[in-house]
Amino acid sequence: MLAKMRRIVKTIRPDRNNMRLATAAFDNITVSSVPPPAPILLTSMPAWRTVTLTWGGPLTADSFNVKRSRTSGGPYGVIATGVAANGYTDRGLDDGTPHYYVVSSTNLSGESADSNQPR
């Protein structure tokens, strides 16, 4: 996040009479922010009725959205939001049915593009 401050009205310091903090005011603050980049290196490890996903996440991500499709290339439906870790296990799947996954990263500025789809 980029912030430009052109004028500081007061500095923050204790008031000598009552030890309260003084206030600070800023003029002309510009905030520019962008969504995080997409997660990288998404991998999947299938097991009986589960698939465990792991990925590399950008440091600017607050959380991740996991998406699944039964068709390679999508369309994908969101199956988990707000995932804090760089991994997720999808449980209770039908055996023998292919599942395809992508992951997106999110922060206060929005959502990234989707990650790669593992092979």
Image (spheres, grey):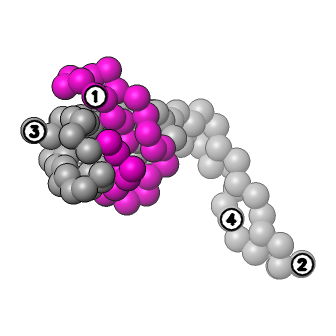
Q: Is residue 81 magenta?
A: yes
Residue occupying the far right of the picture: 18
Disc ID at residue 70: 1
Point out the tag, 1 or 3, that comes first from the N-terminus.
1
Secondary element type, mark 2: loop
CA gap, disc 3 to disc 4? 55 Å
Q: x, y (%) of residue 26?
A: 65, 44
Say whether marks 1 and 4 touch (CB < 8 Å).
Answer: no
How many marks do you count on the picture? 4
Amino acid type, label 4:
Ile
**What are the residue bounds of the magenta stretch?**
66-94
Residue type, label 2: Asn
Find out whether the residues at labels 2 and 3 contact each other: C-beta distance under 8 Å: no
Upstream in sequence: badge 3 or badge 4: 4
User: Which one is closest to the eye, mark 2 or mark 3?
Assistant: 3
Is 35 positioned to the left or the right of 73 in the image? Answer: right
Q: What residue is shown at x 48% (from left), y 35% (from top)?
A: 109
Indicate which label's residue lies in the foreground, 1 or 4. 1
Q: Look at label 1 and name its amino acid.
A: Arg
Rendered residue at 76%/58% (across/down): 23
Q: Quick one: label 2, few (<14), some, or many (20+) residues within 10 Å? A: few
User: Is 105 in the magenta?
Assistant: no
Any mark on residue 119, and which?
3
Residue position for label 4 = 12
Quadrant of image for the N terminus:
top left
What's the distance in space between the residues labelled 1 and 3, CA to CA? 13 Å
Q: Identify the mark nearer the N-term, 1 or 4.
A: 4
Above or below 42: residue 10: below
Mark 1 Cα within 10 Å, few/some/many (few <14, many 20+)? some
